[in-house]
Image (cartoon, rainbow, N blue to C red):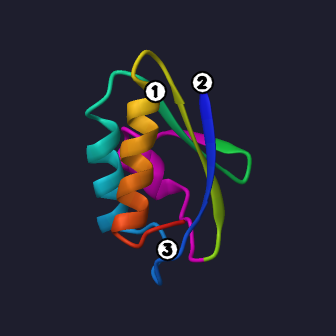
Amino acid sequence: MINKQFTVTGETGLHARPATQLVQVASRFSSDVELEYKNKKVNVKSIMGVMSLGIPQGATFTIITDGHDEEDAMNSIEELLKKEGIAD
């Protein structure tokens, strides 16, 4: 299991477009991928789950990957978040 914390840098927070990108990347892996924000955990492979959290700019959240390709999943998610200016 890998846990990594990120802070939203995008002006509009984790809204529809970045949430969709996050779901698409997470869905490529067989590992479980969860996002934790304010003591709520959601499956990152579910757009409704990610959107339901309403994560604003400046908020800190944790990505948790667990499974045989957890390292690849985390690396890909981290790359997406930084490359697209979503979170650091």
Q: Nearer the viewer, mark 2 or mark 3?
A: 2
Question: Residue 6 bears which disc, if any?
Answer: none
Neighbourhood count class around disc 3 (C-alpha, 10 Å): few under 14, some 14–19, many 20 upward: some
Q: Are marks 1 and 3 in contact (CB under 8 Å)?
A: no
The magenta segment is: 41-57
Sequence order check, earlier mark of 1 and 3: 3
Q: What secondary structure is found at the residue carrying circle 2? A: loop
**Mark 2 — residue?**
1
Q: Is residue 45 magenta?
A: yes
Question: Residue 13 bears which disc, if any?
Answer: 3
In the shown orientation, is residue 55 left or right of residue 28?
Answer: right
Q: What secondary structure is found at the residue carrying circle 3? A: loop
Q: Are marks 2 and 1 in contact (CB under 8 Å)?
A: yes
Residue closer to the observer: 25 or 23: 25
Cα distance in 3D space between marks 2 and 3? 26 Å
> Which residue is depicted at the point 45% across and 80% down?
12
In the shown orientation, is residue 29 left or right of residue 85?
Answer: left
Amino acid identity at mark 1: Glu
Q: Position of residue 80 (x, y in %)?
A: 35, 57
Amino acid identity at mark 3: Gly
Question: Residue 70 bears which disc, if any?
Answer: 1
Cα distance in 3D space between marks 2 and 1? 7 Å
Question: 45 above or below 56?
Answer: above
Q: Position of residue 35 (x, y in %)?
A: 55, 44
